[in-house]
Amino acid sequence: MWKYEFWYWYIVLTLRYSETVGPVFQPSTTLIDMIEGESKTFAMQAVANPTSITYTLYKGDQQSSSFTASNGKLDVTNIQRGAAGNYSLKASNSIGSAYHYFQVKVKCKWYYKTTL
């Protein structure tokens, strides 16, 4: 009589692949249109790996502190007409950087309310 014995050995490999990439902005607004004195928060998020991202705001080619940019959000508080202009938001991590460009328009509060 024949006897067959099979022994199976299983090896389970778990491979984890983690690509490192510089920041890439998610689709965001390119025009911020507000009335003087308003406050709003806008989503301007970048994704990257490693995920530690630093945001820097520029108006024209000068670094700006007009608004607060952190954690993928742009906080605009009590906007004034002097804040109108063209901006770029730079997202950086240890791999690289990306820019998101947007325009800010500010309507005069007095004019806007009297023409409605």
Image (cartoon, rainbow, N blue to C red):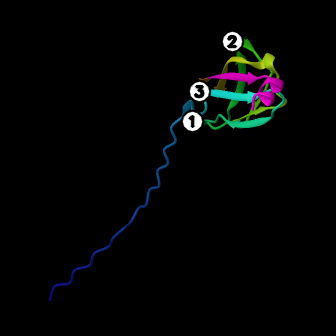
Disc 3 to disc 1: CB gap under 8 Å = no
Q: Earlier in the sequence, mark 3 or mark 1?
A: 1
> Element under label 2?
loop
Q: Which residue is mark 2?
A: 60
From the image, state whether disc 2 or disc 3 is nearer to you. 2
When the figure is inspected, residue 75 is found, relative to residue 7, above or below; the finding is: above
- Which residue sits at x=70%, y=36%? 42
Distance from disc 1 to disc 2, alpha carbons, whole Å, reads: 22 Å
Q: Nearer the viewer, residue 24 or 78?
A: 78
Q: Earlier in the sequence, mark 1 or mark 2?
A: 1
Extreme-top residue of the structure: 61
Check residue 107 for magenta coloring.
yes
Distance from disc 2 to disc 3, alpha carbons, whole Å, reads: 25 Å
Q: Which residue is mark 3?
A: 95
Q: Earlier in the sequence, mark 2 or mark 3?
A: 2
Amino acid type, residue under disc 2 in the picture: Gly
From the image, state whether disc 3 or disc 1 is nearer to you. 1
Residue 92 is at least partly visible in this image? no
Q: Quadrant of residue 41?
A: top right
From the image, state whether disc 1 or disc 2 is nearer to you. 2
Expressed as whole percent of the image width and height from the top left, the position of residue 48 reads 58, 35
Q: Quadrant of residue 6?
A: bottom left
Q: Which residue is mark 1?
A: 26
**Range of magenta residues:** 102-116
- Which residue sits at x=54%, y=34%? 20
